Amino acid sequence: MPSDAAEGSALSLPEWDGLETAVRRLFEHNDALRERVQDAESRIRELEAALRDVSAGRVDPVALAERVDSLERENQQLTERLDRARHSVQRILARMRFVEEEP
């Protein structure tokens, strides 16, 4: 009888695998949600600090917006320079390959 009770209460292998997979996915989902919550809480603290700085007059929102615009323009210019440099390097590499292939 003990063997019958053990067999009746034990899950079959596919059921056990399915349960194990479901529990693992729940733990992974829980970890992902916990990370998202921590990120959101961190962002909230940053935004609250920024709001306090603006409210207290320590930061001028107009000057900040102008600085952001200036940095975005500078970033665009640097991206364009990098693209031109990348293109120049590719041309140089192509020339080097051509020279290397000549007998």
Image (cartoon, rainbow, N blue to C red):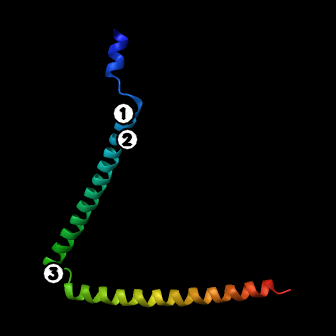
Q: Nearer the viewer, mark 1 or mark 3?
A: 1
Residue 61 percent across, percent down from the top left: 20, 84
Q: CA distance from mark 2 to mark 3?
A: 54 Å
Front residue of this view, candidates 55 and 84: 84
Mark 3 is on which residue type? Gly
Q: Earlier in the sequence, mark 1 or mark 3?
A: 1
Question: Badge 1 is on which residue?
Answer: 15
**Which amino acid, mark 2?**
Thr
Split into 4 quadrants, where in the image is the C terminus?
Answer: bottom right
Q: Residue drawn at (32%, 53%), measured in percent from left and top?
A: 32
Q: Residue furthest top?
A: 1
Seen in the image, is 54 located left or right of residue 7? left
Compare residues 69 and 92 and report the one nearer the observer.
Answer: 92
At label 1, the amino acid type is Glu
In the current view of this chain or complex, which residue is farthest to the right? 103
Mark 1 burial class by Cα count in 10 Å: few <14, some 14-19, many 20+: few
Kindly check if marks 1 and 2 are in contact, taking CB atoms under 8 A apart as contact: no
Tally of marks: 3
Residue identifier under label 2? 21
Q: In what element is the residue under mark 1?
A: helix
Alpha carbon of mark 1 to alpha carbon of mark 3: how far?
A: 63 Å
> Is residue 45 shown above or below 87?
above
Position in image of residue 19 (x %, y %)? 34, 36
CA separation, marks 1 and 2?
Answer: 10 Å
- Pointer 2 with pointer 3, Cβ within 8 A: no
Q: From the image, tell me which residue sits under label 3.
A: 57
The mark nearer the N terminus, 2 or 3, is: 2
For residue 65, what is the image quadrant? bottom left
